[in-house]
Amino acid sequence: MDILQSLLLGFATSLTVPNVFAALVGASLGIMIGAIPGLGSVTGVALLLPLTFQMDPITGIIMLGALYYGCMYGGSYSAIMLNIPGDAPAVVTALDGYPLSKKGQAGKALFTANISSFIGGTVGIVMLTFMGAALARIGLMFGPAEVAALVVLALCSIGWLLGDSPKKGLISTFVGVMLSMVGIGLAFGQPRFTFDSMYLLNGISFIPLVIGMFGFSQVLEMMVNRIDAEGLMQKIGLRKSLLDRSEVRRIIPVSLRSGVLGNLVGILPGAGATTGSFLAYVLERKVGRNGDELGTGKIEGVAASEAGNNAAAAGSFAPLLSLGIPGSGTAAVLLGGLMMWGVQPGPMLFQNSPDFVWGLISSMYLGNVMAVLAALAIIPFLVKLLRVPPAFMIPVIAVICVVGAYSVNNSMFDVWFMLGAGVVAYFMNVAKYPVAPLLLAFVLTPRLETSLRQALDISRGDFSIFFNSPIALTLLGVTALFVVFPFARKLLPSQKRKMLAK
Amino acid sequence: MVRGGGNMNIEKSPEKESLSCLPGLVTIGIVLMGAAWAALGYFKYGFWVNSGPGGGFFPVVAGLGAAVLGIYEFLFSPVKVKAVGIKGLWPAAAMAVTVASIPLIGMVLAMALFIVLWILIVERKSWYKAVLTGAGAGAAIYLVFSLWLKVPFPQGFFLEMIK
């Protein structure tokens, strides 16, 4: 009851004309920034932060929160329409979003992304409202051993994405692990595989890699298979883009369970929205009605990924507000903003600045509503963009790839790297090596390496640290089931297999 | 379907310009990369250091995994691939030339010129459509990235000389 009263007070603070306007502006800017490949929510919040210092702190944080949400919505657009994920979590969205576009159902994919983002985000915010402090304490229970076990689970789940040729998928995963080793490792402080190039000291930048491997390779593919490209650019009416009642019914349960899982992953320090969206996708593949068909262009795949990453974004606020620990890169930038406004996040925040903190939480509801309204309003425009003929679309996408790759670090090296990654990915596609496992292994492995090293440093090389922690043990048990179950199923006689499948 | 070094012996394609040996070359490239990563990881960065995984632990595991599976894939896996059209590499070559020109003419102009020349030469569309698209894209890049987001694009040697 106290929480509800506090929330209502928060709404009284946030629902003023300047604040609603700030949320609308933030959400619209966020969608635009999120949709531009190379610019994610961290860049967006960092760019807008200096402008908000002249505002009232509550108006400022409402604008930034809405921008954060808008970025999460916008990140999926280029992934669905052009196969260029705007940010890391959108890699998972592209797995089903782009095949849907190829089928001429880009509009449905965009609607699904928006609605499931809204549901996932709302689930995340509701959980943050009622269980914020408790969630943050759960997050603190995840030390290096538990995080390492979680990432092992995520890495082993890549098996579900390997596609027709598990061997080639596994080889791609290994290549992703190898590429992630380039640069100065956080756990060791020594440069590895840099071949004396100063450009590689910080490691391979993810966004140029993903733009090259998904986006630029797509340009090359469109040149060869012009007929497919024509299919992509077919005329799509807005009416055909709307979801019918049965489709809405299909995505609601997916969005709800992905939202809960994404939120729980989001509160873990360092786990991030990518792990949230990926694990939500894996869960859907495992328990969903159309799980086996995910990856071929199913709205459930888009819904799982988008609900998972938006809920994770909300989840990252729990440790930020309750403990002063940012759960993601964007939350770290927001923490800087809060401190500059003289607000000190931590256990006393709810006591010392209740109007601010409840104003912020209520503004997340507002930001989420504004983001979905703005996002739904621009779908007709986005659908019209897909009608541009390939003759004009191909060079424009190529240019977007170059400009996006440059904008990440303002580096020409990244542009050259993106071009090289695009050609390599094109060759890999020809040789039927899937690219998605490579990118997910690239994101997840550094976290595993750092956590594993930290855990074994704590235990002085004793592996029992993984078995003494109930959380780590449970996660490793689930991982073992994930790995063993497919093999065990193959060993069963076909009759029993059919019964199990039923 | 073919077996045994099969990646190189693929179906004959009616297309004259093709890169038919590519799939095999990709696998060989991955095997070599895996071997290099495993060797450097083991000998240079250390596999197991101070009771824990060293800097070479993951490179050795992943490198060996990629190399062993790659060799298996190359030698034994049945493959059936269509010939690869070489024209897929045209945009990469054209864009490489464009990117190389950025230090001279700047990012925005280079990108606009790429679009204009591509539409004119490759797509054989009318010049006014090409110029309109190139100018529109160049203006959008300038307004969004340079003016709004303050991305410091290279201006190019010539523009800086004029300034």
Image (cartoon, grey):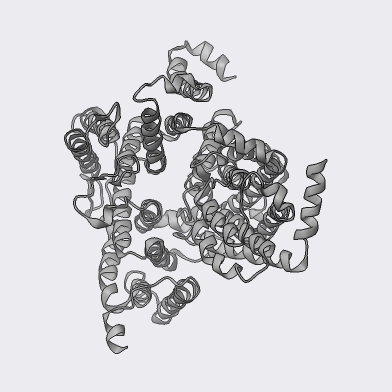
Q: Is residue A203 visible in this depiction of the protein? A: yes
Q: Residue at x 23, y 51 (%)?
A: B18
Task: Indicate the position of residue A273 as horizontal and vertical percent values.
Answer: 53, 45
Q: How many marks?
A: 0
Residue B56 lies in what quarter of the image? Answer: top left
Task: Indicate the position of residue B144 as horizontal and vertical percent values.
Answer: 49, 72
- Residue at the extreme bottom: B162
- Identify whether A324 is placed above or below A414: above
Q: Where does the C terminus of chain B fall, quadrant-wise?
A: bottom left
Residue A428 lies in what quarter of the image? Answer: top left
Which one is nearer the viewer's eye here, B122 or B35? B35
Q: Residue at x 61, y 40 (%)?
A: A263
Q: Residue at x 27, y 29 (%)?
A: B50
Task: Indicate the position of residue A226 as horizontal and vertical percent values.
Answer: 39, 57
Left or right: residue B52 versus residue A283 is left
Left or right: residue A319 versus residue A410 is right
Left or right: residue A195 versus residue A4 is left
Which one is nearer the viewer's eye here, A219 or A182? A182
